[in-house]
Amino acid sequence: MKDWKEVALEISDSLEKAISVLHHGGLRVALVIDKKNTLLGTITDGDIRRALLEHQGMDSSVRGIMNNTPTVALSTDSMEIIMLKMKSRDLLHIPIIDENNQLIGLETLQHLTYDKRYDNPIFLMAGGFGTRLYPLTEDIPKPLLKVGTKPILETIIDRFIKAGFYNFYISTYYKADMICQYFGDGSAWGINITYVKEDKPLGTAGSIGLLPKDLPNLPILMMNGDVLTKVNFEHLLNFHLKQNGIATMCIREYDVQIPFGVVSIKDQKAQNFLEKPVKKFFVNAGIYVFNQEMLGKVKSGDYIDMPDLLKQQIDEGRNVNVFPIHEYWKDVGHIKEYQNVNDSFSNGFSLDD
């Protein structure tokens, strides 16, 4: 994703400056924003040519030149959706915005079709007992249960590989040897795999304290080994880098319907009636990005869950940001959910669709 600041304009800027930005930016597009980085419009070579044909002066404001309804992509859109938007409109570039219409990036067709590689470590949690999936997990660890033709963990790893990541760390405990034997050192997939072996259950974040201390000084992407999703990992990483926080947690909206009519009361008198209302909550999606300094927050061998670790950072005054996801997301933690997901994959569903 390109640094959009190189091609940014303010609404008060002139046609002359727009021409200069297009020339020096080399991206054939300029982005018009306000003081809060809200995207107001775009300017392309074609917009400049039309302005010149209309004899607009070099001191004319970009307000009358820009396209104020450009095609955009959301920060939570998958690469596949972004590509479809660009191809359907024959675009060479597309602004990336968040849910508040604030500009966070600029994607180009050249970048999307280029084979990217990221050195960021990927840390996958695969040590749980899978008790909610018993008896399926009596003889095989949950990460090796198949969805379609591949184990859950291999499906997750494939998604990261296609996004350009190759440096993997896998936390193991229950039936660790089976996982190590299946994936080996990762060379069969063209990646590097290092195993972080727990001697005892350490919770969902305790194994962070077992990670090597000489990891590259880059944000670490961490994910539960039973989550299947189409979330755009590159957009998630870029979001984290721009938010100036120690960690980012992916969240997802979850609806809970109360199965009864709800009565509001005051002073022992009924005030209102709601028939089976739906309550909406944001839930932890089991996907995180955190800075390397988090490695020093967990002592080797200590038990701690990820929500508790993040709450500690918040209590210390650190920023823990949230990244809402709306893409496909399944926590394969119960038998019914596993069976539904397995049926979908067996019938041709893919995270690449």
Image (tube, rainbow, N blue to C red):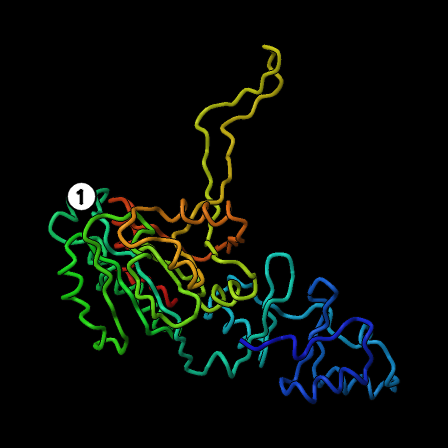
Judge whether 256 appears above or below 18 on screen: above
The 10 Å Cα crowd at callout 1, few under 14, some 14 to 19, many 20 or more, is some
SS under mark 1: loop
Quarter residue 51 falls in: bottom right
Q: Residue furthest top?
A: 268
- Tell me: 148 left or right of 320: left
Q: Amino acid at mark 1?
A: Tyr
Confirm whether residue 266 shows in the render: yes
For the residue pair 77 and 346, the one nearer the viewer reads as 77
Pinpoint residue 137: horizontal percent, then vertical percent: 16, 49
For the residue pair 341 and 316, the one nearer the viewer reads as 316
Quadrant where the C terminus sits is bottom left
Judge whether 216 appears above or below 59 on screen: above
Pinpoint residue 133: horizontal percent, then vertical percent: 21, 45
Quarter residue 49 falls in: bottom right
The residue shown at (74%, 66%) is 34
Q: How many marks?
A: 1
For the residue pair 80 and 234, the one nearer the viewer reads as 234
Pinpoint residue 260: horizontal percent, then vertical percent: 46, 24
Pinpoint residue 50: horizontal percent, then vertical percent: 78, 84
Confirm whether residue 344 shows in the render: no
- Tell me: 68 left or right of 285: right
The residue shown at (25%, 70%) is 193
Judge whether 40 appears above or below 114 on screen: above
The residue shown at (48%, 63%) is 236
Residue placed under numbered mark 1 in the picture: 134
